[in-house]
Amino acid sequence: MDIYEVGARIGLYFIPFLFSLCFHEVAHGWVAMKLGDNTARVMGRLTMNPMVHADMIGTFILPMAAIVLGTPFFGWAKPVPVDERNLKHPKQDMFWVAFAGPGSNILLATLGAFALGFSFKYLQGSEMLEISIAFFRVFIMINLMLAFFNLIPLHPLDGGKVLARFLPDRVNEELEANQHISSMLLLFLFLSGGLRVILFPVEWAFQHLMILQSMVMG
């Protein structure tokens, strides 16, 4: 892979990944603020500046290595801090704070489908059409991957906190205390290819968004 191809892949994959990751984290903090906790705002995390959210390994090294080597795409950002003591209904409110991240990615994927439909409709015959199609299809897929990966019901992922809404406090406290075990399980699933299971809901959602895109085309 030459330097031009690497640059093209960075533009196609890393830029939408970075944008979507930041949007995901801001969504957590914004919903927490609306529900009474200003921790993220006070710490300057309600911004799309990637350096504020970046984890050097998860945000840059692993994704860039995956792009260069052509391996499965994987990454993360620093979690937005939330102080549950500031929430009026901590258990219920944390459900919405946690779901806001994956929900924001589903929103971006949906907007990407609209943008793809408009590209087909208004860029016919343009040199930009092929670029727009490639970009928005990747943008949609990245956001669906982020959404469904984070909805896996294990701590420290958002899905673990979403599931906590429906578990007895004692059970959830035990799961949180042992989240290092679930983190190791997630790493094992990634390395073994077990996380490919999320491709089923991702592909299902992608196909439905393509139907939406075709409706936009008219």
Image (tube, helix red, strand yellow):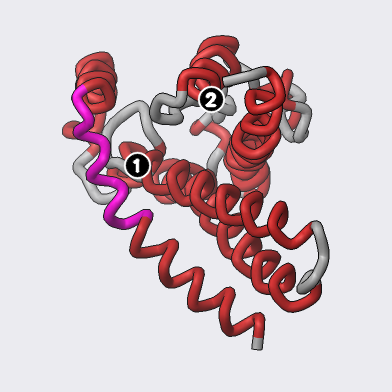
Q: Quadrant of residue 48?
A: top right
Task: Please identify the quadrant where the C terminus is shown.
Answer: bottom right
The amino acid sitting under disc 2 is Ile
Q: Give percent across and percent down for residue 174.
A: 19, 24
- 70 vs 89, nearest the viewer: 70
As drawn, 6 above or below 133: above
Mark 2 near mark 1, Cβ–Cβ under 8 Å?
Answer: no
Determine the secondary structure under disc 2.
helix
* Residue that mark 2 sits on: 67
Q: Is residue 36 visible?
A: no
Task: Please identify the quadrant where the N terminus is shown.
Answer: top right
* Residue that mark 1 sits on: 159
Q: Earlier in the sequence, mark 2 or mark 1?
A: 2
Left or right side of 78 for 201:
left
Left or right side of 191 for 67:
right
Q: Is residue 133 visible?
A: yes
Q: Nearer the viewer, mark 2 or mark 1?
A: 2
As drawn, 152 above or below 187: below
Whether residue 200 is in magenta: the answer is yes
User: Which of the labelled discs sits on residue 38, or is there none?
Assistant: none
The amino acid sitting under disc 1 is Gly
Q: CA distance from mark 2 to mark 1?
A: 27 Å
Q: Give percent across and percent down for residue 19.
A: 68, 38
Q: Give percent across and percent down for residue 120.
A: 69, 72
Q: Which residues are magenta?
A: 192-202
Examine the residues drawn in magenta and state their main secondary structure: helix
Q: Quadrant of residue 72?
A: top left
As drawn, 110 above or below 195: below
Q: Give percent across and percent down for residue 76.
A: 50, 25
What residue sits 48% from the left and 25% below the top? 75
Left or right side of 187 for 174:
left
Left or right side of 63 for 217:
right
